[in-house]
């Protein structure tokens, strides 16, 4: 519409004034409102008049609510961008009025139209539009599904519209309901200013609270729907605002939506953080730099701030935003409108600041936070305990970030400790945790003036009965002071007596310290504790009273004090000292170097614990420590037997043993033989006391065993005899111990006689054979072994057999005891002191001697047990025995000579399937190696390497009873495939060899043991822990070589190898993370070099290790740098021959995928760009192009997610990603689709449907969305490369899915790049024509659409080339290509009609030509093209006649029959359309083309050429051919020539075309030719040889024919038409009439109709239809003709079935008699009667009323004019 001028405005005004009905006003406004509004910006002089006009309209509309305004036209008006602001404002106001006048259904239907116009409006104008929609929004329901959302409100997918809706929604959601009813409250409302409230409500003054509530709920659902295209974090902020609404429907909807959005909303986004801060503090409180990003709101209400603060607590960015963070804290704590919940949230926000804010921010606001928290806790101390607890916790967290604020504030610590006396548990828990966090801050007090104050404070609370205060004070004390600080450790010892387990645990933690902490010096400890003990004894209130005795500590504490002192003493013992004897010697050295005063104080401390009334456990610990001290320094021991008797009769067996030990030490070190004998006599008397208790007898037996070697011979004999007498009693264990102690120093046969000794020996053997209880067996085996130390008369073989048979019990501890006994027997009297009781025999080691016993023991163990056919439990026992012999007989000559045999035996044990047996054997091997000399070590290493690497095992004899496989062995992996029992040790051997340190195999064996036996007392007895530690220290120099291998072995698929290597790792590596970081490059190099190893186990372990390495170090620069190679390696092993390796690689690829996606995130900036540039090439070149589906899948998914998360960083790589995704799309389609397509390939229709479905599915692939995103990022620098690749892909891609994806990509490229793509359209078009040749209809259809899209942006030259290509294809290709060209042109017409209008000269001819296709679908497409072009037929054909003629000429000369036919039809249409407007020169040329085209052979459809020729000659409606510039003779000769062809169907069409020519133009007489031609088809040939002259004459008279073919039908018609050109009609007419009428016998109704038509032509030539007859026809001649015709015509009148035949026959009868009447011709009466008879009969049965009336009229005419006369 156009604007109005001055006169137009006047006319509209006048019509408006004259309009007196609502309907008239509505129609007038519909027509003129838009022009009037447009006139507002045309001429300023019209403003007054227009304002007056619009004012009048407004007044008329004010009370006429039924009058509708042109809503849709107004919407289109305000969408325009060329309007002035005033015009736009007026348009918006009228849109508002128009929308209000719609019904609810209409308003709901047009919601999206209203949204759609927001993009071009200002904020004020948008508010008007949105405000008027508020009542309607209540009834709008937003669906949950994306597809339905897109149908309902598609416009919200536009970002500029979504932004306007968001801004308006924020205002509405902040608006309280009270403003609708109380206008005075506008100025006092939070969040919104009165202007903002007015800006909304003045447009909807009648808005109700219910409508506002419904509108809010709809806005919540709309802004959070899936298609709403706006910044997601801000949407989350909007949901928080809505969640604070006072109406449940709104808040519940917002909370529900927020839960769904919470995982996707990034609360670190700056925009949402600024929004939240502005809503909390108000726009005015924001810094100047942030005000532009707020929405101009005031500080929110209390309800809103309560919702905002928990969300701010989720954001690290918010915690770092100074000074807004501190403003929020103080506002929430001390603001005017706050409550308890807001206080709690504010303190929680302080926690967030302390946890996540940067050091700079925390340091800046730390003092203020501390001050605020203290102020808060003081004000809330009595009111809110929960808040106080949170504040205390906040102070603790603040102290970890700003320790300087707290380190000197001892008063604060005192205050907080005093608060622990509160009863509230939650407060106490928070306060305690806060205080725990403060401990590190107060370390700075050490060495300052406040240290004394702090220690005094802590001591005060440690001594308090309150367990919580004590626990906190202990924690402070432990953290502030090192373990070597005696006063703090002493406090921990005292705290162990607390009734609170929490305090006890804290105290034990303080005593335990860390691994690197040092204990105090022993001397210092003894002095300090001794003094403290003395002070406590002098203070009765601090002592523990037991009867009449006082203990300085409670028993539990006293025990821990003694343990702590002993630990301090043993600190001086080196780690490599593993035996008790060596430890005692070292302790002797330590104690000897100490002042006597210290030793005396230590002894006094121990003795003070041995008061008789003290608990037994305290006695036990004290006696054990005293025995250790006395064993180290026996000369300092002073003992009395009466004092000892008290403990010998104790109920604790260990206490009795240690007391006897102490008595033995005293006897051994005493120089007073008389005193010792008196002790022995006293013990003997106790043994003879038959009334003595079990404990007394047992203690006496033990004492007798220790005293016997130290007394006179007589007393020794008595003591031993008495002890042996208790053998079969309940004191068996004590007897065995006593005998063992005595026999280790004496030859018992000398004292009790050989007979008694032999009897004792048998007792031991019998006891071992009959007993099953482990403890008793251990005692017996220990005792029987000691008998052989000094006695050679006993049967050794019997003892050995007895000991070896104990293996059947399968008791681990018993086996170790047996091994110790064998070692005693092997070493004899010169055995190592570690074998005998360590407290009695503290002597230097003697010289080992060679004994036959050692050889016998070793031979029996190796030959009969290791290499013999024995059970698994016996093999384990053999391993333990060998380990014991190596341990306790290190210097034995036999051991040294048997080292090779021992190693061989141990190697065999390594191959055992029992893990414990393997570990014991490995320990023994390690011990064997460490005790050998250098020469022997080399030999042992070579033997072990050969055994392990070749996995040789000794051959065993196999008989019928031999068990080849055990049950658990069946189904296990063969050793050759990594399942062998030597696998672990082979790997260790390989590791040591690769290091160049083969001797390290023995250290590795130590480290690899992971069985539980080494962590209990057995392991402790063998010193395994210390050995492992030492071995770990030896390996430190080789860590760079070891760490990578051990790291990899931890992931070995063999569980045994994995456990062993994990154990080695745990020993060698104290800090795994730091170690891996240190050797990361070496680990990576090892993994890369071994991941393609020949061994599948190695490949799998490398894959597992690599996955874990990347998972734990996703963002490490070293990992990122190696990521491309990692991908390449893992993708390769995903095709491994081993299934487990493939599975492992698949898991690792998932890890790499996650790491790559994370590394390539846009948030990482330049680092992410570098990651993309390194990772993408591998995935695209090696992954997506792989033939393995799994590799392709993980690569595609990874690249897709990288593309989604990388944002603009992906831009430099889109030219690589897009082609790769197109190529990979073939693998996305389910294989079932291809199978189904193959199954239906026999049915073309089903196959086409299936392919269409596959094409549609391809466009829903997730690849498409990624490709679309990439296409948007394409720039000029990449466009050329991308076009080249796409063109290449178009020519080489195979398959439906890739080609459809490619075509869609090209379409997207055209849509998003448009002008930039123009210069490359030609190249892409060439590629598209390659794709057009695809066999799939779906691909062709998609390609046609793509060509149409490209056509829109093509250069003129490209347009011409495309059209030329399509034209050549259409003229030269087969029918399928013709249909394709039609489809392409149809889509081009729809897509680029404007471009086609510039090339009508090329399009019109082809379209007209295509319209004449014989294929229906193709014809429909061309007709659609023709209609879309929107041209007038005659004018456009005349305009482009030369181009059409040229195209037809080219087509007529084609070898294609179809083209010739189509061209002929086109020329026929041209002639029809142009008619008399056909230019003669062009007509003559086209006729010449058609004449020339008639030459040559006859082909199906050739008749179209002659039909076109006939149409061209007759359509101009000229009388003569010469007027058309055409030679008549040539034309007729062509027709007469073609009509004589043999093809009946063709001849039939030619006859009809000839008839058209004869009927349409004047030609010379050619009747004879026509008659001859027709007779050829209508008259049967004569057989002159068979027929005589008479027969011939008779046949001619009676000759009739039956027309049965189309050719004959055409011949009949031609006779009638051809009669027109006959010059000698009188001579021929009778013959022709008789011929036609006489031969109308049995024939079809259609043929009868043709004959009647020919008769009609004959009758017309007589002039019967004219008023005067032609002179050349006499009445007689006419009569003859009529009489000849009437019988045949009457035959048709009798046709009762076909109305058309009867109607024409009646018409001819009427014509004949009318002619007769006018010419006064009298027919024979018989003929007239016959006619009447036929007509009357027909009239009587005629059902057609018209024909019946016509028949009656004819009958009446005949009766009237012919019979009466």
Image (cartoon, rainbow, N blue to C red):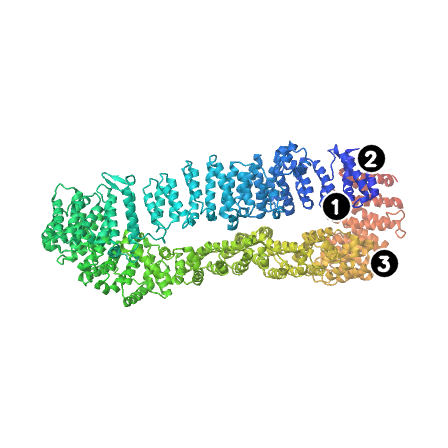
Image coordinates for residue 1731, horizontal then vertical, percent: 81, 42
Is label 2 in contact with label 3 (beta carbons under 8 Å)?
no
Q: Residues within 10 Å of mark 2 (few under 14, many from 20)?
A: few
Q: x and y percent of residue 1293 in the render?
A: 58, 59
Point out the residue furthest to the bottom here. Answer: 935
Task: From the image, tell me which residue sits under label 2.
Answer: 18
Query: Circle 1 sits on which residue?
Result: 84
Asked whether the residues under the numbered discs 1 and 3 touch, taking CB atoms below 8 Å apart as contact, a structural biologist would say: no
672 to the left or right of 259? left
Figure quadrant of residue 22: top right
Q: Which residue is mark 3?
A: 1523
How many neighbours does mark 3 have within 10 angstroms: few (below 14), some (14-19), or many (20 or more)? few
Q: Secondary structure at mark 2?
A: helix
Q: Which quadrant is home to the C terminus?
A: top right
**Between discs 1 and 3, the one toward the N terminus:** 1
> Mark 3 or mark 2, which is nearer the start of the sequence?
2
Secondary structure state at the residue bearing disc 3:
helix
**Viewer-proximal residue, 1408 or 1564?**
1408
In the image shown, does 1394 or 903 lie closer to the viewer?
Answer: 903
Nearer mark to the viewer, of 1 and 2: 1
Q: Secondary structure at mark 1?
A: loop
């Amino acid at each position: 519409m156009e604007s109005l001028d001055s006169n137009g405005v006047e006319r509209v005004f006048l019509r408006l004034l004259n309009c007196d009905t609502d309907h008239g006003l509505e129609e007038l406004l519909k027509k003129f409102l838009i022009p009037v509004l447009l006139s507002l910006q045309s001429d300023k002089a019209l403003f007054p008049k227009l304002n007056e006009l619009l004012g009048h309209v407004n007044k008329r509309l004010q009370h006429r609510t039924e009058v509708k305004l042109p809503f849709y036209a107004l919407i289109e008006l305000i969408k325009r961008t060329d309007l002035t602001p005033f015009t736009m404002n007026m348009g918006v106001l009228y849109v508002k009025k128009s929308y209000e006048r719609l019904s609810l259904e209409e308003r709901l239907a047009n919601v999206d139209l209203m949204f759609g116009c927001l993009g071009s409006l200002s904020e004020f104008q948008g508010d008007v539009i949105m405000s008027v929609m508020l009542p309607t929004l209540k009834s709008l329901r937003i669906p949950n599904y994306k597809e339905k959302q897109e149908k309902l409100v598609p416009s919200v997918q536009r970002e500029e519209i979504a932004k306007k809706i968001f801004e308006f929604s924020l205002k509405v959601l902040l608006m309280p309901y009270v403003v609708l009813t109380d206008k005075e409250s506008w100025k006092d409302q939070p969040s919104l200013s009165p202007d903002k409230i007015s800006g909304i409500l003045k447009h909807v003054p009648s808005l109700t609270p219910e409508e506002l509530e419904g509108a809010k709920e709809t806005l919540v659902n709309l802004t959070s729907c899936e298609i709403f295209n706006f910044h997601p974090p801000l949407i989350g902020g909007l949901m928080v605002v809505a969640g604070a609404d006072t109406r449940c429907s709104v808040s519940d909807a917002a909370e529900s939506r927020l839960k769904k959005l919470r995982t996707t909303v990034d609360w670190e986004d700056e925009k949402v953080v600024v929004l939240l801060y502005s809503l909390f503090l108000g726009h005015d409180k924001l810094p100047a730099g942030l005000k532009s990003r707020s929405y101009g709101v005031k500080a929110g209400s209390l309800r809103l701030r309560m919702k905002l603060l928990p969300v701010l607590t989720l954001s690290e960015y918010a915690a770092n935003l100074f000074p807004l963070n501190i403003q929020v804290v103080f506002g929430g704590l001390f603001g005017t409108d706050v409550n308890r919940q807001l206080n709690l949230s504010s303190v929680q926000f302080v926690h967030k600041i302390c946890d996540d804010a940067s050091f700079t921010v925390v340091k800046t606001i730390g003092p203020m936070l501390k001050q605020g928290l203290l102020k808060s806790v003081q004000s809330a101390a009595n009111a809110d305990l929960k808040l106080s607890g949170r504040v205390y916790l906040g102070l603790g967290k603040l102290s970890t970030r700003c320790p300087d604020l707290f380190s000197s504030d001892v008063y604060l610590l005192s205050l907080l400790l005093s608060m622990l006396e509160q009863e509230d548990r939650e407060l106490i828990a928070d306060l305690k945790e806060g205080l725990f966090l403060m401990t590190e801050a107060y370390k700075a007090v050490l060495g300052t003036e406040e240290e004394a104050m702090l220690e005094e404070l802590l001591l005060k609370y440690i001594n308090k009965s309150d367990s919580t205060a004590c626990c906190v004070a202990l924690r402070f004390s432990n953290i502030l002071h090192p373990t070597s600080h005696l006063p703090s450790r002493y406090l921990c010892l005292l705290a162990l007596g607390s009734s609170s387990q929490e305090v006890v645990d804290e105290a034990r933690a303080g005593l335990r310290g860390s691994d690197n902490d040092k204990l105090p010096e022993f001397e210092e400890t003894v002095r300090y504790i001794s003094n403290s003990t003395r002070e406590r004894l002098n203070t009765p209130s601090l002592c523990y009273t037991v009867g009449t005795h006082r203990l300085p500590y409670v028993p539990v504490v006293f025990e821990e004090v003694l343990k702590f002192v002993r630990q301090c003493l043993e600190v001086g013992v080196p780690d490599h000292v593993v035996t008790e004897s060596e430890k005692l010697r070292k302790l002797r050295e330590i104690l000897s170097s100490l002042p006597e005063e210290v030793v005396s104080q230590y002894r006094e401390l121990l003795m003070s614990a041995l008061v008789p009334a003290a608990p037994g456990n305290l006695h036990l610990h004290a006696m054990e420590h005293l025995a250790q001290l006395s064993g180290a320094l026996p000369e300092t021991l002073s003992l009395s037997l009466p004092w000892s008797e008290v403990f010998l009769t104790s109920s604790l067996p260990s206490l009795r043993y240690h007391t006897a030990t102490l008595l033995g030490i005293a006897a051994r070190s005493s120089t007073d033989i008389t005193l010792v004998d008196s002790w022995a006599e006293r013990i003997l008397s106790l043994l003879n006391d038959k009334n003595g208790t079990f404990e007394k007898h047992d203690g006496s037996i033990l004492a007798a065993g220790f005293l016997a070697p130290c007394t006179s011979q007589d007393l020794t004999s008595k003591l031993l005899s008495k002890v042996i007498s208790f053998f079969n009693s309940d004191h068996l264990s004590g007897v065995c111990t006593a005998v063992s102690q005595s026999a280790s120093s004496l030859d018992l046969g000398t004292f009790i006689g050989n007979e008694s000794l032999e009897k004792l020996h048998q007792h031991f053997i019998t006891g071992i054979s009959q007993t099953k209880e482990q403890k008793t067996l251990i005692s017996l085996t220990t005792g029987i072994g000691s008998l052989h130390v000094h006695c050679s008369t006993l049967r050794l073989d019997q003892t050995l057999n007895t000991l070896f048979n104990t293996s059947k019990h399968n008791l681990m501890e018993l086996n170790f005891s047996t091994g110790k006994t064998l070692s005693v027997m092997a070493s004899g009297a010169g055995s190592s002191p570690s074998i005998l009781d360590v407290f009695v025999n503290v002597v230097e080691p003697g010289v080992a001697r060679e004994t036959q016993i050692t050889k016998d023991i070793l031979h029996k163990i190796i030959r009969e047990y290791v290499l013999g056919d024995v059970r698994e439990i016996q093999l384990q026992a053999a391993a333990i025995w060998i380990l014991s012999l190596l341990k306790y007989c290190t210097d034995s000559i036999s051991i040294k000579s048997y080292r090779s045999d021992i190693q061989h035996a141990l190697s065999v044990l390594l191959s055992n399937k029992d893990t414990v047996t393997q570990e014991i054997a490995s320990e023994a091997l390690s011990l064997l190696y460490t005790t050998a000399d250098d020469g022997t070590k080399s030999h042992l290493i070579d033997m072990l390497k050969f055994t392990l690497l070749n996995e040789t095992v000794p051959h065993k004899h196999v008989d019928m009873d031999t068990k080849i496989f055990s049950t658990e062995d069946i189904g296990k992996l063969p050793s050759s495939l990594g399942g062998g029992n030597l696998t672990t040790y082979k790997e260790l051997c390989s590791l040591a060899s690769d290091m160049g340190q083969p001797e390290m195999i023995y250290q590795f064996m130590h480290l690899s043991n992971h069985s539980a036996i080494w962590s209990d007392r057995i392991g402790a007895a063998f010193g395994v822990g210390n050995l492992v530690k030492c071995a770990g220290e030896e390996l430190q120099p080789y860590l760079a070589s070891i760490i990578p291998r051990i790291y990899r072995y931890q992931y070995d698929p063999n569980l045994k190898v994995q456990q062993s290597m994990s154990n080695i790792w745990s020993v060698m590596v104290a800090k795994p993370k730091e170690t891996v970081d240190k050797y990361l490059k070496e680990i990576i190099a090892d993994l890369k070099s071994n991941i393609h190893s020949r061994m599948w186990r190695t490949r799998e372990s490398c894959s597992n290790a690599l996955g874990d390495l990347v998972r734990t170090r996703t963002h490490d620069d070293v990992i990122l740098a190696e990521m491309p190679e990692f991908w390449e390696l893992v993708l390769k092993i995903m095709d491994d021959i081993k299934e487990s390796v493939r599975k492992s690689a698949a898991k690792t690829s998932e890890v790499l995928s996650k790491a790559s996606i994370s590394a390539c995130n846009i948030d990482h900036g330049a680092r992410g760009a570098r990651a993309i540039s390194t990772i993408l090439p591998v995935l695209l070149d090696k992954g997506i192009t792989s033939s393995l589906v799994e590799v392709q899948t993980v690569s595609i998914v990874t690249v897709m997610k990288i593309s989604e998360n990388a944002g603009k960083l992906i831009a430099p790589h889109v030219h690589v990603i897009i082609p790769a995704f197109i190529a990979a799309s073939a693998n996305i389609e389910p294989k079932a689709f291809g199978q189904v397509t193959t199954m239906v390939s026999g049915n073309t229709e089903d196959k086409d449907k299936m392919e269409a479905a596959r094409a549609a599915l391809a466009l829903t692939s997730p690849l498409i969305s990624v490709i679309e995103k990439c296409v948007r990022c394409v720039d000029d620098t990449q466009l050329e490369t991308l076009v080249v690749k796409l063109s290449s892909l178009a020519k080489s891609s195979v398959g439906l899915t890739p080609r459809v994806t490619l075509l869609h990509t090209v379409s997207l490229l055209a849509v998003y790049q448009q002008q930039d793509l123009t210069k490359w359209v030609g190249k892409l078009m060439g590629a598209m024509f390659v794709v057009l040749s695809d066999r799939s209809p779906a691909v062709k259809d998609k390609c046609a659409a793509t060509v149409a899209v490209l056509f829109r942006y093509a250069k003129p030259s490209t347009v011409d080339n495309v059209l030329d290509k399509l034209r050549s294809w259409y003229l030269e290709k087969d029918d399928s290509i013709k249909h394709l060209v039609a489809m392409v042109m149809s889509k081009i017409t729809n897509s680029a009609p404007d471009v086609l209008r510039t090339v009508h000269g090329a399009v019109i001819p082809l379209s007209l030509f295509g319209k004449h296709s014989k294929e229906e679908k193709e014809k429909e497409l061309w007709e659609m093209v023709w209609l879309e072009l929107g041209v007038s037929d005659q004018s456009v054909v005349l305009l482009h006649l030369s181009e059409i003629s040229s195209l037809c000429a080219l087509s007529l000369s084609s070898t294609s029959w179809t083209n010739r036919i189509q061209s002929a039809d086109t020329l026929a249409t041209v002639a029809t359309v142009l008619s008399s407007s056909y230019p003669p020169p062009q007509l003559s040329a086209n006729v010449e083309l058609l004449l020339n085209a008639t030459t040559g052979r006859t082909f199906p459809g050739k008749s179209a050429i002659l039909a076109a020729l006939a149409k061209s000659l007759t359509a101009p409606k000229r009388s003569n051919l010469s007027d058309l510039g055409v030679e008549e003779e040539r034309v007729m000769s062509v027709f007469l020539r073609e009509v004589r062809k043999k093809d009946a169907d063709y001849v039939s069409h030619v006859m009809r075309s000839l008839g058209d020519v004869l009927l349409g133009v004047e030609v010379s007489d050619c009747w004879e030719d026509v008659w001859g031609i027709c007779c050829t088809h209508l008259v049967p040939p004569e057989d002159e040889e068979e027929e005589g002259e008479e027969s011939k004459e008779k046949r001619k008279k009676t000759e009739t024919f039956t027309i049965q073919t189309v050719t004959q039908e055409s011949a009949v018609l031609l006779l009638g038409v051809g009669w027109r050109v006959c010059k000698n009609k009188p001579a021929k007419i009778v013959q022709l009439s008789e011929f036609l009428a006489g031969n109308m016998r049995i024939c079809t109704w259609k043929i009868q109709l043709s004959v009647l038509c020919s008769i009609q032509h004959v009758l017309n030539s007589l002039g019967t239809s004219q008023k005067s007859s032609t002179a050349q026809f006499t009445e007689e001649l006419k009569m003859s003709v009529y009489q000849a015709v009437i019988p045949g015509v009457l035959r048709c009148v009798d046709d009762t079935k076909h109305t058309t035949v009867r109607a024409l026959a009646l018409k001819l009868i009427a014509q004949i008699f009318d002619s007769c009447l006018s010419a006064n011709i009298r027919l024979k009466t018989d003929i007239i009667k016959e006619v009447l008879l036929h007509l009357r009969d027909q009239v009587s049965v005629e059902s057609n009323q018209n024909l019946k009336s016509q028949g009656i009229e004819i009958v009446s005419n005949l009766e009237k004019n012919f019979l009466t006369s």
